[in-house]
Image: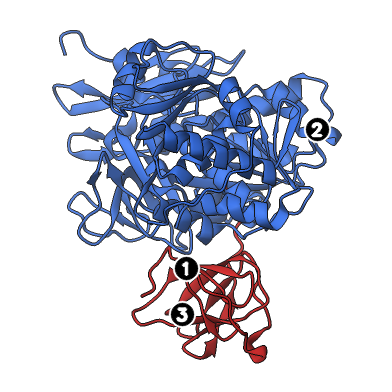
Amino acid sequence: MNIALFLQMAAEACGDRRALTHEGTHHTYAELYGAAKRAAYRFSTAQCEYVTLIDESSPAVPIALMGAAMAGIPYVPINYRLSDEQIIPLLERIDPAYLILGPKETDHSPEHWVTQSTSEFMSDVFSGDEMEVTWNEDPSAVAVQLFTSGTTGTPKAAILRHEHLVSYILGSVEFMGAGEEEATLVSVPPYHIAGISAVMSSIYACRQIVQLPTFNPFEWLNLCAQEGVTSAFVVPTMLTRIIDELEASDIELSSLSSLASIAYGGGKMPVPVIEQALKLFPNVNFTNAYGLTETSSTITLLGPEDHRTAVDHVDHDDVAVHARLGSVGKPLPSLELEIRDEKGKPLGPWDAGEIYVRGPQVSGEYDGRSVLDDDGWFPTRDAGYLDDHGYLYLSGRADDVIVRGGENMSPGEIEDLLHKHPAITDAAAVGMTSEEWGEVVALAVVKAEGQEITEQEICDHIREHLRSSRVPEVVHFTSELPYNETGKLLRRVVSEWFRIEGD
Amino acid sequence: MLKPGLRLKSAVCEAEIMVIKATEGDDLTCGGVAMAEAPESAEANPDQMDGCLIGKRYVNEAESVEVLCVKSGDGSIYYNGDELMTKDTKKLPSSD
């Protein structure tokens, strides 16, 4: 069991089909397979224990991933936006490595390492003799190691073994399920689990990948039109920017007629944004995917049908169905999911707690240490609840829960309410130390352009719709909230704004 | 002994499979001849030559055995004398 199988099968079944497009250059599955085998040979002979890539998306990404799998070496893509100070400690943890490096310079490349620029690597693997490569089928070998973003402390190395990734793909993707005309636009970075799963699921479906190395909404729309893109995955901030761009520029919606589906995930999607997107793209199928690095990507899905039903109910009294737009949907058929309280007791519908999952795609392992419980359940550290029909709603990280005088509050509850307010574009609720309550709510708010709203009005609005404990002690107005490049709100940074001196 | 991840080839055609699920003492044949990692070519049983297709998953009735066809061939896959049936992957919307 080895993820290299996906590429081997694609090359076997449709070798001449277009596999990859990058900056106008195309590659077939046969070419990609040949390149991966040559890469595997290079990795094997280099006497390295890891393959790492520090660059944006390029054909080197799927080739290094598959080549490393064939060579039986973990593939470790690293965020190219990190500073040298952040990268060097990570490189020290994967010694010795075969390093594929973008334009970024790094001082860390010891003599016993092989260091190549991305372009050098690509020209080496795209030419030369056909290689015969055999690989190890051990399901428990490590396929991918991803460093978590480390928003709290030292980055952890999440371990994904071949069995996890193969289970995920076989359980969710139909081999050669894509038609010859299908193309998916990949704009998520290669060091993100969504970037890894996009490569694997596209290859197994035999769907062409169109790479957009650095996201910008104009380029995204352009590529959609130019390459006849039929599907795409975006994080929430990307969708917001695409919508803004469409409204501001003179790009015709008709030029995007090939676009049939958009999947989104990687952060919480504000309901008004998805509502707007559904109106703007009435013929596009939207899918919300929730997943984690430690679970080999997607664990729950809110499908196109759910989106349409929810929109159809907007004018009806069925509030619950409409609210599903704010849900991340139901677990994949191969997975089990439970909500548990702090003591580990399973909770019923509507009770918020920590999300636990179990299934063959779940690794739940860091640096060789498993965090699965005795029965194989993985505590996601995400908080959420289920409705009566098994739809999952996220309410933030379990660690983000604000505890005011013993009462647990989810920041998401407050933020969701404010996102719907016409005078507010964005909001973040965090806990602030309080002598009286332990913690109280502090709120950072971005006002909508040309709109006015006072602290008092915000407090009144919250008091009116939620419990009075949710009313913030402090409101800070700001021009924007801090997000990382995949659209994750950096709560730690927001919390810093409210840190009391000497705290 | 079959175990998940094991790759087996047909002795009678081009077919290759990967074992996804198996129990002890399993016996897989293709075209009537035992499959192996490196089989010597053999004479097929013409009654067991309906073919197998790349990307399809094959299971027995009890679903105690499951294999993935990774290379198409002319032989049919049998387990302990019973022909394996194709199993459909539940069609899910693409999420990545």
**Contact between labelled residues 2 and 3, with CB atoms less than 8 Å apart:** no
Residue at image point 49% right, 34% down: A42
Q: Dot 1, crowdedness within 10 Å: few (<14), some or many (≥20)?
A: few
* Label 3 vs 1, first from the N-terminus: 1
Q: Which residue is mark 3?
A: B63
Which of the chains is blue?
A
What is the secondary structure assignment of the residue under circle 1?
loop
On the same chain: label 3 and label 1?
Answer: yes
Residue at image point 68% right, 58% down: A177
Residue at image point 56% right, 48% down: A132
Read off the chain for label 1.
B
Q: Which residue is mark 1?
A: B37
> In x, y percent, where is residue B24?
33, 79
> In x, y percent, where is residue A286?
65, 46
Read off the chain for label 3.
B
Q: Which residue is mark 2?
A: A225
What is the secondary structure assignment of the residue under circle 2?
helix
Query: According to the rendering, which colour does chain B have?
Result: red
Q: Is residue A444 left or right of residue A433?
A: right
Marks counted in the figure total: 3
